[in-house]
């Protein structure tokens, strides 16, 4: 038995209500009640993609793989005429240098810092070259840190500032400015390894 309900004054289309077992019934809008809202559909946003930047290639020299008991390691590189100092793996100082000339080249190898002198006279006669010979000398130096027992130091050499970072003119020592010589004297402990690389001086075997 079909029953039809007629509600006057309702002319607009109404939502359809579905009751299980019965055909769909159109329910009209009733004045005074809110009209059911149509569900909104949203389009999902595409996933964001992260951009990764390739790590930059480190510049400058690589710390030599030598043992240190002081935390410091140095590399004196003849190719660049510089000495680089690391402390606990980080570069703390880079200095222009002048090492031994072709007549007196600084041997390659691993040296270790030894005694220090605030100032001293370097005398060629101590290793058999008379000071009055063409290759002899007796020179006053400041901030000298011994690297080998046979007479190689890193020390202040203000007379070779023009050659430091450019060419080799010493008798085997590592020449640096007075400021840099003082920094080594003040900061570098005894036993710090200094690696000399790239000279024509053969191999250093002592310590």
Image (tube, helix red, strand yellow):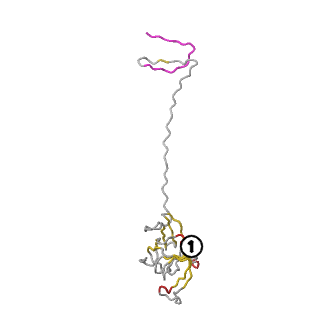
* Residue visible at 49% across and 62% down in the picture: 58
Q: Residues within 10 Å of mark 1 (few under 14, many from 20)?
A: some
* Residue visible at 56% across and 20% down in the picture: 33
Q: Name above or below for residue 114 compared with residue 24.
A: below
Is residue 156 visible to the viewer in this orientation of the structure?
no
**x, y (%) of residue 109?**
44, 74
**x, y (%) of residue 148?**
46, 77
Is residue 168 visible to the viewer in this orientation of the structure?
yes
Q: Which residues are magenta?
A: 1-19
Which residue in the structure is indicated by mark 1?
182
Towards the viewer: 203 or 20: 203
**Residue 168 located within the stretch drawn in magenta:** no
Towards the viewer: 11 or 173: 173
Q: Quadrant of the C terminus?
A: bottom left
Q: Quadrant of the N terminus?
A: top left
**Residue 17 located within the stretch drawn in magenta:** yes
Q: Main secondary structure of the magenta part?
A: loop
**x, y (%) of residue 112?**
46, 73
Q: Name above or below for residue 128 compared with residue 67.
A: below
């Amino acid at each position: 038995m079909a029953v039809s309900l007629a509600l006057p004054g309702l002319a607009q289309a109404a939502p359809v209500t579905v009751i299980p077992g019965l055909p769909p019934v159109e329910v009209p809008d009733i004045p005074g009640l809110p009209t059911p809202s149509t569900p909104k559909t949203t389009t999902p946003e595409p996933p964001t993609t992260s951009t990764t930047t390739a790590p930059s290639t480190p510049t400058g020299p690589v710390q030599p793989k030598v043992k240190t008991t002081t935390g410091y390691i140095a590399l004196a590189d003849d190719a660049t005429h510089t000495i680089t100092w690391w402390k606990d793996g980080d570069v703390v100082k880079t200095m222009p240098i002048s090492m031994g000339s072709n007549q007196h080249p600084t041997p390659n190898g691993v040296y270790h810092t030894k005694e220090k002198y605030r100032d001293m006279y370097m005398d060629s006669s101590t290793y058999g070259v008379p000071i009055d010979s063409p290759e002899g000398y007796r020179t006053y130096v400041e901030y000298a840190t011994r690297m080998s027992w046979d007479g190689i130091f890193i020390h202040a050499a203000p007379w070779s500032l023009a050659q430091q970072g450019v060419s080799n003119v010493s008798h085997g020592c590592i020449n640096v400015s007075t400021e840099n010589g003082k920094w080594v004297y003040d900061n570098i402990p005894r036993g710090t390894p200094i690696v000399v690389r790239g000279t024509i001086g053969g191999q250093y075997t002592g310590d």
